[in-house]
Structures are given as C-alpha cells and as structure tokens.
Image (cartoon, grey):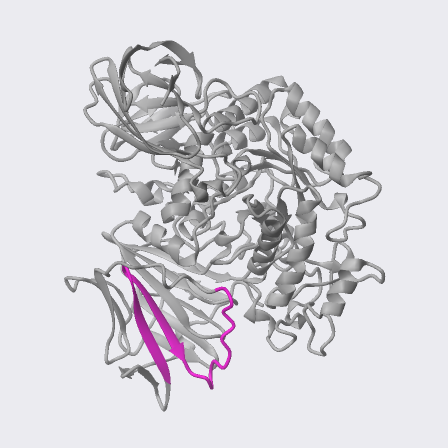
Amino acid sequence: MYFHKIRHPSNFVFAHGADAGTLRFGAGQAGVTLRDLGEDVFHVELADPGRWPLDPRLVRMHDDAFAGASQHRLELSEGAGLRLLRGDGHPVLGGRDAACLGVCGSAWLLQLEREAGMRFYGQGEKVTGLEKSGQRTKFWNLDVWADHPMPVVIEGQADPQYAAIPYLLIRNGEDWVGLLVDHPGAVFMDTGSNWFFSGHDDLQAPPSLWVGADQGVPAFYLIAGRSAASVTRRLQRLVGKTPLPPLWSLGHHQCRWGYRGPRDLERLHEAFEAHQFPCDGLWLDIDYMDRYKVFTVSPEHFQDPAAELRALADKGRRVVPILDPGVKVEAGYEVAESGLRAGIFCLNPEGQPYVGFVWPGRTWFPDFSLPEARTWWADYARRFREGGFHGAWLDMNDPSTGAAELDDMRFQRGRWDHWTYHNTYATGMAQATREGFLAAQPDERPFLVARSAAAGSSRYTAVWTGDNWSNWHHLRAAIPCTLNLALSGLPFNGPDVPGFGGHADRELALAWYKAGFLFPFLRNHALQGTAQQEPWVFGPEVLEVVRHYVRLRYKLLPYLYQLWVAQEADGSAVMRPLFHDFDDPPGLALDRVDDQFLVGPALMQAPLLQQGQAHRSVVLPGAGRWMDAGSGAFMAAGRMVHASSDARSTPVYLREGQLLPMQPGERLSQASDLADLELHVILGGGCRESAELDYVADDGLTYGYRRGLRSRWSLRAWREGETLHLAVRCLAAGHGPLRLRLVGYDGASAAVVETAAGTQRLALVPHAWRFSGAPLAAAIGPALTV
C-alpha cells in the first residue's frame, strides 16, 4: 500500500442526477439513503450490490443515541449535490451538483466545496499538527517503527500512525461540522493539498476537500453544530462514550521494556515508597512471558504468580502486563492448540492458518471478527485477570505481523479480504479482553490500554500513542496529537513520558513531565537498551520537581475524576483545545494555538516546549479572569500575556468562577479518597459571579455507583468582600458524607457555609501551598462533614 498516494477526483465519475433514493452515474445507478438521526446528526449510505457486494462493518455506531429534533437539514439536489443547511436555509457545507458523490471501479469518493476560511481538525492519531489544512492522508493502522523508515519516525513525520479514525472536524465561520467515514479499511482524505509539481492548477478547479475509500460500502455521518464542544459530545455518543475508568488508572504508571517479574516490581515499589512518590501501576513488557507466549508467565521470573501479584496489590500496586495477539506456533502450547481446535485463527488464501513473524517467531492470529474467537480470547483473558493481573496493555494489535504480507491474512474463515477488518482488529481484541476481565470480576471496572484503535474503540479501551522518541519534537507533537484524538472520540489517551526510544536527558525529562502531568494517561516507559528513566535516576533536583507534579496530579484526582464522570454521562471531552470552550478574542485565533490546552473547564496549561526556553506568550481566552497558579494573581482574559518559567515551575492557569475539588494536603502515596476534599474556590476580590459544581464520590473501583452507591452534592459559591459563601445540597448519599475544607484566594478570610443542617460562619486561616512556582497565598477553613 502507498501511504502518500491517494485517489484524485479527476479519475472519478460523479453522480449527475438523483431522485427517489437513486443516484445516476452515466448509464449506471446506485441507491442512496439519507437519514436524520436527530439532534443534527445525519447518515448517508450508498448501495450497489454489483459494485460493493460486501458490507464488513462489524463495529456499528450508535445511531439510536439521539432523541432530540434537528435544527439543521441535509438535502440531496436533483443534480446529486449534498447540502447541509441551517434551519433558516443558510448553507453550512455542501458539494456541487455532478461533482459530489463519485465512483471509480469499487472506489468511492465524497467531494465537498472548500471555502477559503475553513479550518480542519481531528483525523484521530496523526502527528501532522493541530490544524489540518492542505494535507493529504490515509487512515490505516500501522506498526509505525516497522512500516516507516526510522529517521522519519524519529523526526516525528510518520503518517499514518497506529490508530486510524477517519474523522474531520470542520470549522466554517460560525458553523462546525463533524464528518465521520464509517469504514473498517483504508480511507483517504484531502483538505487542499498541492497536487502539481509547478504548484499551479491550469484548469483552475474549484477548491474542494474529499474523502473516500478504495472499496466497501460508502457510508458517512455529518454532525452539525455551532461549537466544537457540541459536535464533539455528539460524536462521542455516536461512536461510544468512555466507560467510567477506575480511579487508579488516572494515576502515575511506571514501565520499561526489561522489567521481567515480581523481583523487578518489588524493587520499583521500594523505590517509590522510599521517595514518597505516588504510583499506582507497575507494568510488564514482553520479558515477563515464557518465551513471548501470550497468556503465560516465565517460570524463571515468577515462582508463585498469584501470591506474588497479591503481595504487590496489598501494597497498593496494580500490575499491568502486555498482551499481544500473536500466538506462538508450537506443539504442546495449550493456547495455540486450543485455538487450532476451535478454528478461530485467521486463514490465508489457501485455507491454512495465516503465519506472521513477531516476538515468539512464527505466530498465528485470532480472527476477532468471529464472535467465537472473541469468546475464546475472553476466556483466556478471564483466567489472566483471575490470576492477579489488574489491567492489560494491548500491543501489536495493528495487527503487526513482522515482515509477512498482511494481504494474506484473511477474516471470517478466509472469506473476507484483509482490508475488511484491518482497522477494527484492535477494537475486536479490546472488546474480547474487556469481556474476559468482566467475567473474572463482574463488579470491577476494567482498565485496558491499546496501541491501535478505530472509531468505537473508546467503548472498551484507552489508547497510548505508541512508540515515540525522547526528543523535543515528539514532546511538542504530543499535545496536538492528544487533542485531536479527543476531538475524534478517543479522549482517554496519552504518550509515553519522557519518550520511549532514545535517551531522555534531565532537561527533557523535566519538560515532558511538566507538560504531561495532567494528560489523561500518564506512563513513564522506555525501550530496552536506552538509559534508565525512572524519576529518581536524573538526580535529586529533577526528582523533586517531577515528584511535585505527580503529587499534584494525585491532589487533583477528584477534579480529574469528575471529568470522566461527565465523559461517561454526555461525552464531554477531558483534555481539549482552547477553541473547544472559547470563541476567538479580538486579534487572537484560538484555533491556531497548538501548545496550550484545557483540562476540563477550570484548568489551562501552557507548557514550555523548546530546549532552553524560559519565556513564552500565553493566550488567556474568554471573558472574566484567570488566576495564575504560580503567583495567585488574577489576570484579565481575552488577551495575550507573557509567562516566565524556571526548572521548578510551569505556566498553569485556573479559571475564575470555578470550584476545583482536590485531595487534602500533599499526596505522599497513591492512596485516595474522593469523599475527603479541599474545595478551592477560584473567586478573586471583586468577583461578582458565582461558581457551581455538581460533585460525585464513589469507591472509584466498582460498579456500585450504578446501584446507587454514590453520593452527589450540588455546590454553589459566591463572594462578598473577603467572605466566601458556600451553599451545599446533598442530592444522594449512597457513598456516605463528604469531608470538606474551603480554600480561598486573593484576600478571602472568612466563609459562610449553608447546609441542610443550618448555617456556619468560619474563619479561614493563612495557608501557603505550591501549585507551580512559589507558594500560593491562600486561606483554608476547618474540615466540615456535609
């Protein structure tokens, strides 16, 4: 497959007429169905059994997730041009008559008019920047290090990457449109790239953008809205919201290719304990297995796996091993022999099990397109979970087959070509693994992290953004990559910190931790043979800073957890770009800002991402004010300011008018309690607005919250002079009461707290604590139980 060559509209025949559900292509025709799914979500699908005889879409979108009426409409003209219109008839997006829906053999294409002011985002996991104008790309899950030259990988120029999500978020003036291609194979897309050696089109064709595929049923969704946030929430509902993860998955994780078993993990545990460095997850790469055989452990490195894993769990450590889909071809290997008996492996064109070459050598691959294969895999995953492992790291599921040609790997007992399930192979593996973990622990929320993914993977797994490199380019690219994944329906993601390949030095390790300490997923991971990069190996000064920001992450876990509660409820993004929440201030284009980001509605980061950098410009979006978390100063929004940073600090800003729930004190371990809080009231002197928060607490681990074992409070705060007022209403008490301490800023010295039990007047005493930079001057009240 050519990664940088795609089909061009010049080679397509376009439908020139449409009526009664039929498109006319010259002498041929195809059926066309337009559906309004509700809430401004539309679905378009073409049908021609002769041209597209097979529909291999096994991962179905949630078409039934929308109950409200649409305020937009989608029309197909008599000339076969699609038009997306507002309710008042104002055009939002469209294709020209006789140049919109095209065919070229089995290939199909959707071409839309590209207006001069359009901006483009999304595209899943790409390292091609935040905004996507002028790009030509393919969506095809890859083993990046195996399929691209290493200099291209190291320079951060490899495209495609591991997770293929053919989604484009389009901004056209005040309108936003999401375009999702529903296809399990290779999809191509062009947002105005240059096709001419001379740089000039002699025919002066009208500017356009297009998407399409080489084969398979043409099907796509359009989601219309007036903000990026509204479109993103509905996209998430369409592809599948992220189930509420266990609280421990939001903590810090430590991994290295080279950790082999309990002895290595016990040494890690002792080091984290000695340094009072919170860390929930200890991870095992391929060396823990018996000769890289999936669902085994090495007898050399494990003596009593269940007891050894239980001992680590008793110390608060969760062990997460790698699982690869490849099954070693070996007589007497129970996993291989049972899979062969069950007939669940992918076949080659001759009807024999397809053989690839990965870590175990010759390997067979489960055909996750088969329900019986997913059941078979789930049973082994169940046993693995019952054996004491707490999560699973799903690697090599692109699928990676070494140097073996992928086209020979077929699905559905050899009846389907490889393209039919390639991009959804990883989703099938994640679905089966999740089902196995739930079978082992039905009341415990599973935690899976996958390398490859597709639209819909969010229902089953988080994603880490694959094998990156310890350099400044990869650090800078991590932010727009993570943001675009969130805009594309995969919010639970993050990169390896401070880079997997290469050698991170002290400055890079510091910069990466300071930039990434609030990414949705935070794991330190390194390649075998590279320099050690556990937090303490860089020296005491680096350890102190890195530990501070990881402790700060644990302090902020109550806030982060609320963001995932909202994601499960309505699909709200967690880490998101500035334009997700704010309109452009005068003279400032937020959709061009790719080195700042929001973590929920209350917190904004603007890390320093260049070697040796000590200063940067920061955009303060919106109206009102932001509080500088390094100084405590309240600063007017809607403008650009200059920030300075040293080795200990990083620019972080808290939005005025927000309530920020945190755990009390400095977090010296990973122990957490969502019902024991400091409530930081971000209301400066003279602020006349109120701050509101619906806060929930549960056990952070089980599904008890679905059975009513969750407490929920409505919190509303306002300020009068130096006095903070807080009104608390308990809406549910299934997890017990809330222990609460008020924290105020900018001269707050007293509080009035109103609860169902009455009103209390409290004195707030001076309280200095460090977020970023120098200690903040704050004031804290006594603990209350509400």
The quadrant of the rendering that contains the N terminus is: bottom right
Number of marks drawn: 0
Q: Nearer the viewer, residue 388 or 99?
A: 388
Using the rendered view, name the quadrant where residue 388 is placed: top right
Q: Please name the residue shown 58% across and 26% down the image.
A: 278
Q: Nearer the viewer, residue 343 or 761?
A: 761
Q: Nearer the viewer, residue 393 or 212?
A: 393
Image coordinates of residue 296 in percent, x first then y, are 76, 49
Q: Residue furthest bottom?
A: 27
Using the rendered view, name the quadrant where residue 497 is placed: top right
Left or right: 62 as drawn, with respect to 429: left
Find out whether residue 32 is within the magenta segment: yes
Q: Nearer the viewer, residue 681 or 737?
A: 737
Residue 740 higher or lower than 192, as above or below: above
The quadrant of the rendering that contains the C terminus is: top left
Q: Please name the residue shown 68% across and 27% down the image.
A: 269
Span colored in magenta: 30-59
Left or right: 591 as drawn, with respect to 342: left
Q: Is residue 532 visible?
A: no
Image coordinates of residue 259 in percent, x first then y, are 73, 37
Left or right: 672 as drawn, with respect to 387: left
Using the rendered view, name the quadrant where residue 28 is placed: bottom left
Image coordinates of residue 352 in percent, x first then y, are 74, 74
